[in-house]
Amino acid sequence: MVPNKVERITVLGAGVMGHTIAQIAASTGFEVTVRDIAQEYIDNAKSRVERNLKRNVERGRMTEEEAQEALSRLSYSVDLAESVKDADLVIEAIPENLDLKRQVWGEVSVLARDDALLATNTSSLSITRIAEAVTKPERFIGMHFFNPPTHMRLVELIPGAGTDSTTLEGVRAVAERLGKTPVVVEKDVVGFIVNRVLITYLNEAAKLAESGEYTVEQVDAAMQYGAKMPLGPFMLSDLIGIDIVHHILKVFEENLDTTYKPAKSIVALFEAKKLGRKTGEGFYSYAERPSVDEAMGEGFDVNILLDVLIKEAEKVVAEGIAGREAIDTAMKLGANLPKGPFELKEGN
Ligand SMILES: NC(=O)c1ccc[n+]([C@@H]2O[C@H](COP(=O)([O-])OP(=O)(O)OC[C@H]3O[C@@H](n4cnc5c(N)ncnc54)[C@H](O)[C@@H]3O)[C@@H](O)[C@H]2O)c1
């Protein structure tokens, strides 16, 4: 597949990420097919996309005509072979399970054209391990969108051990056409850039509150008002979902080292199924919308946690995963940090 020549995209999985990626692709001119395993998931995705496009029109983000054109470029299927046979690029957004992804990619890489580009949206699995199930793995790559893909500008591109440069350039061109800023992750290490730095920071924040020296509200208030973060680490953990934070830390613990072991409070919330906003309780209760004010942050030095971000970013550089500039860009666009870790370090 020649870069810039991708016109037809198939999205596997019509869940949280898949339906939104499909919506953006159809809105930016690609012909899109969405595949899920049962009609009810397809119906659900279809009505979500229609609702989102309608809202975009109401808010003046696109014209009625553009929305109709986007809808006309979208089709849906439960048939795997049918959905991938004409694709120039297949983007997979099915559940985060290595065996499932390998099984699906084993089938897709045979059913799709052998010059089709193949991309997984995994957030924590090894690209190289998934690629072992793929025929012609040189066309397989990680293409990691952030939630919600409509608003988050970053896409991490992660070549696996066997990915060739044509594949990287092909998906880079697609990411740009989707209106995203691609950042290349040079080494396929779990967590890539943003999750590695961000989730480690959330874990260290939890350990600090467990020490009893600081409270959850105090740390959140200081980070929000003092460090100008959009949300403190505990509200952010609740927003991301304690199950996702816990899962990613377990992957880090198993693949990196035991310092990434999930903090006790994260494990306790996970086991109690208090998963954050989506279940109504996590570090905070969501019976009413929690909030913190500036005064609550007194007594917590934000540098304690900013140093965690900086140190983890330095490890990412030392491990050859990405350079400083790429990390700063990724953390600003993928985690909404007001400044990148190296900008913080240099006081810029
Ligand atoms: N949710 C996030 O914040 C986020 C962010 C970045 C990346 N991701 C990654 O994106 C992927 C999908 O996550 P999600 O949150 O959208 O999950 P989700 O559970 O919302 O959606 C997954 C969808 O895949 C479908 N599915 C299952 N098996 C399938 C198959 N064989 N073929 C086609 N569809 C199949 C399911 O029915 C479901 O609709 C995961 O790898 C996840 O790690 C998620």
Image (cartoon, grey):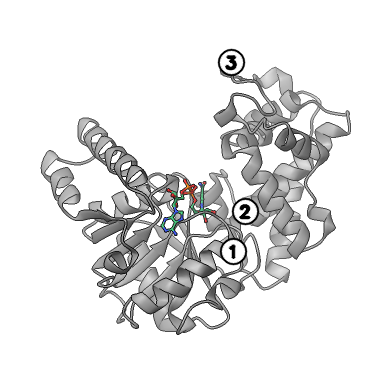
Residue 186: percent from left, percent from top: 58, 73
Comparing 62 with 131, the one in front is 131
Residue 187: assigned label: none
Work out whether 205 lies above or below 299.
Answer: below
Quick one: SS at disc 3? Answer: loop
Ligand 1 within 8 A of label 2's CB? no
Residue 98: assigned label: 1
Residue bearing mark 3: 287
Observer able to see residue 59:
yes
Q: Pointer 1: residues within 10 angstroms few (<14), some, or many (20+)?
A: some
Distance, label 2 to label 3, CA atoms, is 28 Å
**265 horizontally vs 194: left or right:** right
Could you say which quadrant of the image residue 210 lies in? top right
Comparing 189 with 229, the one in front is 189
Label whose residue precedes the other's in the sequence (1 or 3): 1
Quick one: SS at disc 1? Answer: helix
Could you say which quadrant of the image residue 165 lies in? bottom left
Residue 335: percent from left, percent from top: 56, 47
Residue bearing mark 2: 195
Circle nearer the viewer, 2 or 1: 1
**102 horizontally vs 273: left or right:** left
- Residue type marked 3: Ala
Circle nearer the viewer, 2 or 3: 3
Label whose residue precedes the other's in the sequence (2 or 1): 1
Work out whether 24 lies above or below 265.
Answer: below
- Given the current orientation, which residue lies at the most extreme left position? 65
Residue 5: percent from left, percent from top: 25, 75
Distance, label 1 to label 3, CA atoms, is 36 Å
Circle nearer the viewer, 1 or 3: 1
